[in-house]
Image (cartoon, rainbow, N blue to C red):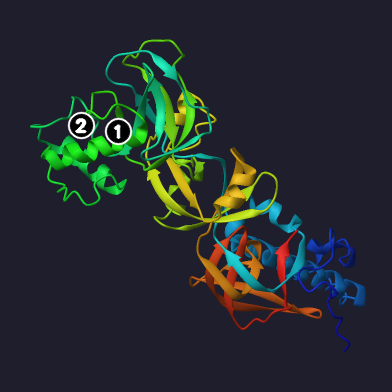
Amino acid sequence: MTVSQPVRSTDPIAPSSADVPTASASASASPSASTASASADVPPAPAPTRRGRRRILVPLVLVAAVGGAAALGATRPWERGSAVAEQPTLRHGTAVVEKGSLSSGIQVAGTLGYDALTPVVASGRGTYTALPAVGSVVKAGGRLYEVDGRPVVLMTGDRPLWRDLGPGVDGPDVRQLERNLVALGHADGLGLAVDGKFTAATAAAVKRWQRALGVKPTGTVELGGVVMLPRATVRVHQVAAQLGSPVGSTAALTVSGTDLVAVVRPAENQLSRFKPDGKAVVRLAEGGTVQGRIRSLIRGGGGEGDGESGGSGGDRQKTVVTVALDDQGAAGRAGPSTVTVNVVGDTATDALIVPVTALLALDGGGYGVKVVTGTTSRLVEVRLGLVADARAQITGDVKSGDQVVIPT
C-alpha cells in the first residue's frame, strides 16, 4: 500500500502557507464519523483514496506547525504577554553571530565649562578703581582688583579675613597670612615660623611683600587688602561690580578654576553608571574626543562648573556630575560648549555577540539560540554574559559566523 507523505516546507523555521492546501473538508473524514456510520448499518465507506489520505494528514501538519509557532513565541522573553492568536503571523529571519567588543556605557548630553565658580565679596570700605577683564587669570600674589587706588591681592586660604592683621594679633587668619608670605618668597632668611602669631619676623615679611606691590610698607595688613580663596590660580568668570561704585556686601566678581570640565545632569535611573573615578570619553562639539574621569557627583547640586549656561530651576535640582579632562589643550580649543559624555561601563572583548531578540527562554531556566545550518536548525543552550545596546554576549556551542534565528 502506498502511503502519502505530508507536504514539507523548504523554510527551516515554519511551513509556508503556499505549500499547505485548504483543509476545510477534512472534518468529514475523522475516525469518529466512520464509527458512527458503521453502527447505523450503513455500508462501510470506501477506503480513502490517495487524495483523501493527503487531506487527513495535512491538517495534522498544520496543527503541529501552529503549535510549534505558538511555543516558539511563548518562549521568547520579549514577546511574553502577546496574544496567542497572533503568534502564527510571526516571520523570522537570521542574524550572524559576531565576534568583537561590547560595552555597557551610556551617552549623556552635557556642557563644557570652567568649574568651581566662587563669588568674591569685597571687604572693608572704599571705591572700586580698577577691575579685571573677564577671562583673565590671576595667581596667588597677583592683583584681583583695586580699591581707592590700592591693589587687592589674591592669597590662598579657606578662611576669609575679617580684621586688620598686625603686631600682637594671633589666630588662624595670621597663620594663613604667614603661610602665603613663605610660599611667595617674602619670608626668605627671616626665620618666620608659621605659628599664627604676628611677630617681628611676620611684620618684616609683610613689608617685603608691600614693597614688591609698590605700596607703602607699613608692616600691617588692612582689612580688604587681601582676598583669601581656596585656589592658588583663578580665572575671572564674571564681573558684577561697576567702576566707581562703593564696596558693598554683594559679590564684586565671580572666579573659577582654570581647568575646563564636562558637567552632566543625568536622570535618576542613570546614576548607577557613574562610579567614583570612573572613566569617561567626552565628544567635543567640533569633533574629536577627550578622555576623562568622574571627579564628583553632587545630588541636587546647583552646578559645579558650566557657568556659561544657568539652566532652569528644575535642572539645578538634578544631580550634577563633574568629569575632569585629561587634555586641557584640546578642551581649551573647543572652549565652553555642548558635549556628549560617554560613560565607560563594563566591557567584554573578543566576545561572541548576538541580537537580544535571538535569545530563547528555556523551560528549565537559562537561554538558548536556534542555529541554522542549511535547511535545518538546532536549539543550542548558551550562557549569557554582558548585555548592552540590544546585543548580548553568549558562550556555548556556537561560533563566529553562525546564523541564528531572529524575528523580523
Q: Is residue 177 left or right of residue 330?
A: left
| Residue behind mark 2 | 219
Q: Toward which corner of the image does residue 372 lie, by quadrant?
A: bottom right
What residue sits right under mark 1 in the picture?
210
Q: Is residue 181 above or below residue 348?
A: above
**Residue type highlighted by circle 2:** Gly
| Place of residue 280 in the rendered image (x, y in percent of width and height, measured from the top left) | 52, 55
- Real-space Cα separation, disc 2 to disc 1, in angstroms: 8 Å
Which quadrant of the structure image shows residue 68? Answer: bottom right
Q: Residues within 10 Å of mark 2 (few under 14, many from 20)?
A: many
Q: Is residue 171 visible?
A: yes
Marks 2/1 in contact by CB < 8 Å: the verdict is yes
Along the horizontal axis of the image, is 369 left or right of 238? right
Taking 8 as reference, is 405 left or right? left
Q: Which residue occupies the extreme left position in the image?
A: 168
Mark 1: few, some, or many residues within 10 Å (few <14, many ≥20)?
some
Instruction: Say which of 22 and 271 sits in front.
Output: 271
**Residue that protrudes farthest toward the bottom in the picture:** 1
Mark closer to the chain start, 2 or 1: 1
Q: Secondary structure at mark 1?
A: helix
